[in-house]
Image (cartoon, rainbow, N blue to C red):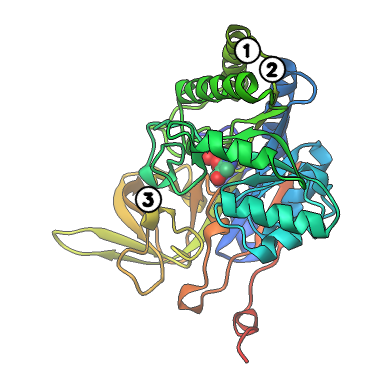
């Protein structure tokens, strides 16, 4: 099995986080998303401990909550003592509902509306990560009305192009995000932010992309950012208090992906940062990182029920399931690889090549093409592994299909965290 929270139990069924997945499928119905809470917490602790050890006590991971957002996740972040990254009023609202201490929230996005900005200030969001000049004007304006000085980091693009899918690459100069160092726009927005009375500039942020397995792009980004920080210090006498390096560490979806040792990677990055700070003769800023995918992806699986197995002579075999692109659009969007298996036949030989198809009226509604699994039949439970990040978060109601529930398992015990959407929920907005 690709992760150690996955096992085959003595009934020959797939066990996830010490729970029989076929029992969960029976109890809650399918499609069903299952989250291994203990694994989420253990990933958070790995980051937190490694960062505190390498960068000092003030360093902190921020959970990039767009990866998977519901109240339970913010409660875990609160209990584990980490920060969060939020990107919309909706995420802020959910975090507030969960009782998250909002001074540890960082508000991102390349186009925060006036409404978002007002809402975030009223919700006492600790930090804005400002993207552009117009936004700084708006933050300054609403901060003035609220009679506060808003803490702000500036989103910069260091000009790094990591080896990842172009749809999740965000650190190059030609990006909708942030201000480029290479074009001097980063320098300009810094002086602009410093001139604003109701803005307290706290430092800089970059996020170079996602599903990155190599350390080097992060080290390169840190180098460019620290060089910039040192130059700004020299030119304007402004020393950044924070440097936020964003998220992006890769996750093992299939046997073809390596398993990253996050602790070792953080230590490697910190060794470089310490050297760089010496080289540029600056005090090391407080380092923040924003893992999303790597905290939740391998803590989640999705369970489906097989409806049909269609064999087209001379062509493909299609296994249709009771979910699809509505709960997992990542194959349709990025051709993302996944590991798939038949949960109630987990100990049987996998020798049946097929394509896993969803139930939407789209030929592109596929979960995976040409995978080899045990031959299933109607009623079998199909498990798709490593679905904790950007699956539920990207789900939709296309074809008026309700979203699945999320069940949390901890210590072998299961509990409902997000209920299944009903067809009545789907009509609740219709007037
Ligand atoms: C998406 C995103 C993250 C998280 O990226 P992962 O690849 O999920 O770790 C962090 N910071 C920002 C600004 C992002 O947009």
Q: Secondary structure at mark 1?
A: helix
Q: Earlier in the sequence, mark 1 or mark 3?
A: 1
User: What separation in Å lies between label 1 and label 3 (alpha carbons)?
Assistant: 38 Å
Q: Is residue 236 above or below residue 352?
A: above
Crowd band around label 2 with a 10 angstrom C-alpha radius: few (<14), some (14–19), many (20+): some
Q: Which residue is mark 1?
A: 277
Cβ(mark 1) to ligand 1 < 8 Å?
Answer: no
Q: Secondary structure at mark 3?
A: helix
Q: Is residue 244 above or below residue 89?
A: above
Instruction: Name the residue located 36 percent from the left edge and 75 percent from the top edge.
Output: 361
Say which mark, if any, is on residue 284.
2
Query: Left or right of 389: which side holds 160?
Result: left
Pointer 2 and pointer 1: residues touching (CB < 8 Å)?
A: yes
In the foreground, 376 or 198 = 198
Q: Is residue 257 above or below residue 388?
A: above
User: What separation in Å lies between label 2 and label 3 (alpha carbons)?
Assistant: 37 Å
Q: Is residue 414 visible?
A: no
Q: Is residue 47 above or below residue 413?
A: above
Image quadrant, ligand 1: top right
In the foreground, 411 or 390 = 390
Outermost residue, left direction?
314
Tell us which disc is closer to us: 2 or 3.
2
Say which mark, if any, is on residue 334.
3
Q: Position of residue 220 (x, y in %)?
A: 47, 21
Crowd band around label 1 with a 10 angstrom C-alpha radius: few (<14), some (14–19), many (20+): some
């Amino acid at each position: 099995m690709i992760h150690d929270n996955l096992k085959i139990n003595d009934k020959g069924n797939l066990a996830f986080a010490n729970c029989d997945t076929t029992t969960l499928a029976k109890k809650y119905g399918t499609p069903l998303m299952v989250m291994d809470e203990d694994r989420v917490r253990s990933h958070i602790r790995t980051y937190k401990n490694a960062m505190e050890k390498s960068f000092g006590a003030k360093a902190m991971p921020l959970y990039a909550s767009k990866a998977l957002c519901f109240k339970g996740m913010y409660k875990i972040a609160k209990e584990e003592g980490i920060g969060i990254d939020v990107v919309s009023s909706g995420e802020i609202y959910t975090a507030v509902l969960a009782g998250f201490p909002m001074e540890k929230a960082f508000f991102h996005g390349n186009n925060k509306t006036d409404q978002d900005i007002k809402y975030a200030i009223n919700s006492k969001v600790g930090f804005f990560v400002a993207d552009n000049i117009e936004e700084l004007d708006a933050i300054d304006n609403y901060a003035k009305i609220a009679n506060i000085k808003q803490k702000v980091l500036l989103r910069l693009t260091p000009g790094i192009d990591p080896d990842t899918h172009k749809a999740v690459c965000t650190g190059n100069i030609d990006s909708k995000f942030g201000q480029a160092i290479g074009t001097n726009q980063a320098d300009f927005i810094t002086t602009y932010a410093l001139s604003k009375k109701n803005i307290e500039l706290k430092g800089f942020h970059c996020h170079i992309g996602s599903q990155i397995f190599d350390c080097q792009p992060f080290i390169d980004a840190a180098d460019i950012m620290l060089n910039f920080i040192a130059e700004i210090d020299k030119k304007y006498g402004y020393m950044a208090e924070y440097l936020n390096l964003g998220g992006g560490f890769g996750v093992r979806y299939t046997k073809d992906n390596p398993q990253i040792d996050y602790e070792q990677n953080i230590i490697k990055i910190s060794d470089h940062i310490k050297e760089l700070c010496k080289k540029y003769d600056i005090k090391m800023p407080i380092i923040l990182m924003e893992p999303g995918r790597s905290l939740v992806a391998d803590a989640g699986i999705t369970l489906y029920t097989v409806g049909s197995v269609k064999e087209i002579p001379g062509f493909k075999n299609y296994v249709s399931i009771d979910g699809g692109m509505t709960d997992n659009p990542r194959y349709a969007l990025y051709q993302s690889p996944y590991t798939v298996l038949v949960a109630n036949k987990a100990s049987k030989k996998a020798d049946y090549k097929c394509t896993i198809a969803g139930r939407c009226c789209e030929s592109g509604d596929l979960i995976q093409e040409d995978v080899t699994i045990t031959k299933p039949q109607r009623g079998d439970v199909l498990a798709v592994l490593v679905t904790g990040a950007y699956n539920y978060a990207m789900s939709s109601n296309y074809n008026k299909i309700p979203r699945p529930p999320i069940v949390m398992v901890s210590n072998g015990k299961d509990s409902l965290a997000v209920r299944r959407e009903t067809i009545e929920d789907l009509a609740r907005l219709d007037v």
